[in-house]
Amino acid sequence: MSEMKQSPEKKETAEQAEASLSTNYVVRAIGVKKVYTMGAEKVHALRGVDFAVRRGEYISIMGPSGSGKSTLFNMIGGLDKPNEGQVYIDEVDIAALNPVELAWLRCHKVGYIFQTYNLITVATALDNVMLPMTFAGMQQADAQDKAIKILERVGLGERVLHKPLQMSGGQQQRVAIARALANSPSIILADEPTANLDKKTGLQIINLLKELNMTEGVSIITATHDHKMLDISDRIAWVRDGQIEKFQKRSELEIKEGEMHVQ
Ligand code: ADP
Ligand code: MG
């Protein structure tokens, strides 16, 4: 075979390519299974999922309610552990980490966004965004400067001293996005980030996530059943009954006026 007769230079190139391939994944899940035990009943939430996200990619996990999106989200975010299989975040096998190391990884590498924002309601937008930085050991003054910059970045420069209940849903989700960005993560994980928002506000949030993906190079993984997410995703993982049915690139989708046609 012609591949067998590679010159030394070509071989080196192949090795380099392989090396860059592994470092170019921010998340890898291999054969992940998750079973929840409820008394005598077992729920097979994930039945063996292989999932890899390239650095800088925007990927949506799409599927009906109960299909296992949040469970997968929790596994790849290191929030929960699989019964079987491995999860690598930035090529670190998270099962090999002790609780302190895992907390460090989550704090520095991953930003989380949830459907219900999960903000601290008694704290201002500024304090909410500063919290992960303080937790990471940053000086108060530096954390405050950085938090203000990020809040300006997400369009909330005028709202830094507002508390969550003094803001609209869309503004609260922007605070959550700012908080997710606090420690300059390589990955943002967003679980149904637009589910509690009206169509227009949801679209603004989607566009903001896309903008951050493009300008900051942060990889974005959303679990969603919002079809507005489709046309800005680089790739879609279709999940059904705890398994990935298929992956599709955006170019393989045809999206027409809110309707979706899968080719
Ligand atoms: P999705 O996010 O796609 O709606 P989930 O990942 O939340 O789906 O749930 C997948 C399945 O696992 C569902 O059948 C759900 O009822 C079950 N499940 C999720 N979390 C738990 C839990 N903590 N305990 C027991 N069953 C759970
Ligand atoms: Mg869910």
Image (cartoon, rainbow, N blue to C red):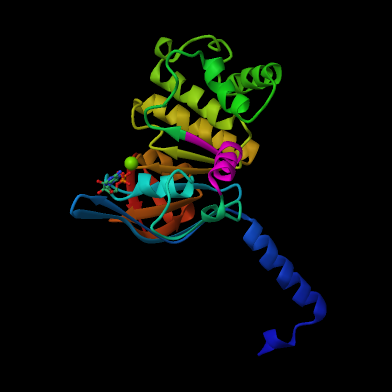
Residue 12 visible within the image: yes
Instruction: Indicate whether residue 107 is drawn in magenta.
Output: yes
Q: Which residues are magenta?
A: 98-112
- Compared across the picture, whether 225 is left or right of 14 comes to left
Secondary structure mostly seen in magenta is helix
In depth, the one of 133 and 16 nearer the eye is 133
In this rendering, is residue 101 above or below 181? Answer: below
In this rendering, is residue 19 above or below 160? Answer: below
- Number of callouts: 0
User: Residue 204: image x %, image y %?
Assistant: 46, 27
In depth, the one of 40 and 180 nearer the eye is 40
In depth, the one of 47 and 100 nearer the eye is 100
Instruction: Indicate whether residue 179 is drawn in magenta.
Output: no
The residue shown at (42%, 22%) is 170
| View quadrant of ligand 2 | top left
User: Residue 90: image x %, image y %?
Assistant: 61, 51
User: Residue 195: image x %, image y %?
Assistant: 34, 32
Which quarter of the rendered picture does the C terminus lie within?
Answer: bottom left
Which quadrant of the figure has residue 144?
A: top right
The residue shown at (42%, 46%) is 80
The residue shown at (78%, 73%) is 12
- Compared across the picture, whether 75 is left or right of 218 comes to left
User: Residue 89: image x %, image y %?
Assistant: 56, 51
The single residue placed furthest to the left in the displayed view is 40
- Compared across the picture, whether 230 is left or right of 140 comes to left
In this rendering, is residue 161 above or below 53? Answer: above
